[in-house]
């Protein structure tokens, strides 16, 4: 019960990796704020784990400010923020519309900025905080058809390091987790050929599951990781070695 009574905010908690992260925190005693775009989606997870559901669009400043006011009023001051909400709008660069670029950057990168800004003051006051950004191996290596997503996920590394430098003296760490290919709704459209390539290439010869990601997040959110900041843990079965 290493997160007993700590308030943990997980964005994108309705399904996939975020749901698994929310489950893992709840199993360790945390009061988990499960955030998704709809209250129905967030409630599915919250009811299953004994958390509280919140609806917000992480790309919208007003929505994010209202979210953190509501979380603080209902659960207390967050000590952990997991910026996990994300979307893809994959297509080749020459076909990519301006809106495909803007929306992916807005949710994956600006969303993390807005949520981090919204918790920073209260974490600074508490002189304690853990911020974990869910990036991607695609942010490290790029990917054809994902210029928008790769740019957003690469941007998260810059955000992570900058926040680590700004807030370290206040007892706040900020780190990233870079998953490889994980079986969720986001990757359900991948071809069988691509999945077989992953299975052949990765030393751990399978796609990942959401449960493979949450232990790295919980470690970075724990009190034991207080001397680690601005870093990335890659969780990809060795695919990018
Ligand atoms: P997913 O199954 O598609 O779930 C995405 C989550 O993000 C959902 O809970 C969704 O809520 C939420 N979300 C989307 N737009 C949002 C917004 N504007 N405001 C608030 N919440 C929003 O995705 P996933 O595969 O679990 O991915 C989770 C994170 O891991 C993402 O950041 C993704 O980029 C990253 N990642 C995934 C993989 C992979 O292989 N799956 C690999 C590397 C990194 P709704 O249900 O309400 O839409």
Image (cartoon, rainbow, N blue to C red):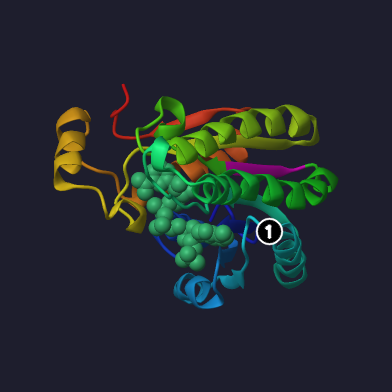
Q: Where does the image place residue 212, in percent across and percent down from the top left?
A: 35, 45
The foreground one among 85 and 164 is 85
| Point 29% across, 51% down: residue | 183
Q: Please indicate, yes or no, whether residue 22 appears anywhere in the rendered image.
A: no
Residue 129 among those drawn in magenta: yes
| Point 51% across, 76% down: residue | 43
Q: Where does the image place residue 178, in percent across and percent down from the top left?
A: 44, 36
The foreground one among 204 and 37 is 37
The foreground one among 93 and 150 is 93
Horizontally, residue 213 falls left or right of residue 77, namely left
Residue at the extreme top of the image, as rendered: 241
Q: Dominant secondary structure of the magenta stretch?
A: strand
| Point 14% across, 32% down: residue | 200
* Residue topped by disc 1: 60
Q: Where does the image place residue 2, in percent across and percent down from the top left?
A: 56, 51
180 lies above or below 119: above
Quadrant where the C terminus lies?
top left
210 lies above or below 135: below
Whether label 1 lies within 8 Å of ligand 1 gets the answer yes
Choose top left, top right, bottom left or bottom right for residue 32: bottom right
Q: Where does the image place residue 231, in percent across and percent down from the top left?
A: 56, 27
Residue 10 among those drawn in magenta: no
Dot 1 falls on a residue whose secondary structure is: loop
| Point 63% across, 66% down: residue | 56
Horizontally, residue 5 falls left or right of residue 90, namely right
Q: Residues within 10 Å of mark 1 (few under 14, many from 20)?
A: some
16 lies above or below 200: below
Choose top left, top right, bottom left or bottom right for residue 65: bottom right
Horizontally, residue 145 falls left or right of residue 42, namely left
Please state the extent of the stretch shown in magenta in the rendering. Answer: 128-132
């Amino acid at each position: 019960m290493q997160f007993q009574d700590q308030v943990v905010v997980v964005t994108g908690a309705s399904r996939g990796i975020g749901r698994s992260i929310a489950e893992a925190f709840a199993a360790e005693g945390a009061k988990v704020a499960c955030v998704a775009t709809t209250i129905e989606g967030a409630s599915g997870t919250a009811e299953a784990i004994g958390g509280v559901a919140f609806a917000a669009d992480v790309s919208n400043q007003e929505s994010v400010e209202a979210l953190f006011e509501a979380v603080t009023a209902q659960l207390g001051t967050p000590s952990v923020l997991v910026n996990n909400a994300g979307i893809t709008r994959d297509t080749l660069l020459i076909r990519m519309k301006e809106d495909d670029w803007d929306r992916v950057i807005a949710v994956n990168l600006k969303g993390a900025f807005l949520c981090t800004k919204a918790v920073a003051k209260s974490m600074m006051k508490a002189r304690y905080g853990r911020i974990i950004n869910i990036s991607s191996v695609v942010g490290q290596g790029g990917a054809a058809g994902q210029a928008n997503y790769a740019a957003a996920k690469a941007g998260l590394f810059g955000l992570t390091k900058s926040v680590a430098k700004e807030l370290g003296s206040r007892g706040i760490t900020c780190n990233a987790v870079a998953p490889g290919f994980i079986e969720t709704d986001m990757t359900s459209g991948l071809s069988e050929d691509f999945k077989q390539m992953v299975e052949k290439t990765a030393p751990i010869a399978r796609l990942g599951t959401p449960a493979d990601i949450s232990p790295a997040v919980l470690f970075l959110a724990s009190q034991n990781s207080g001397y680690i900041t601005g870093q990335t843990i890659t969780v990809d079965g060795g695919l990018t070695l």
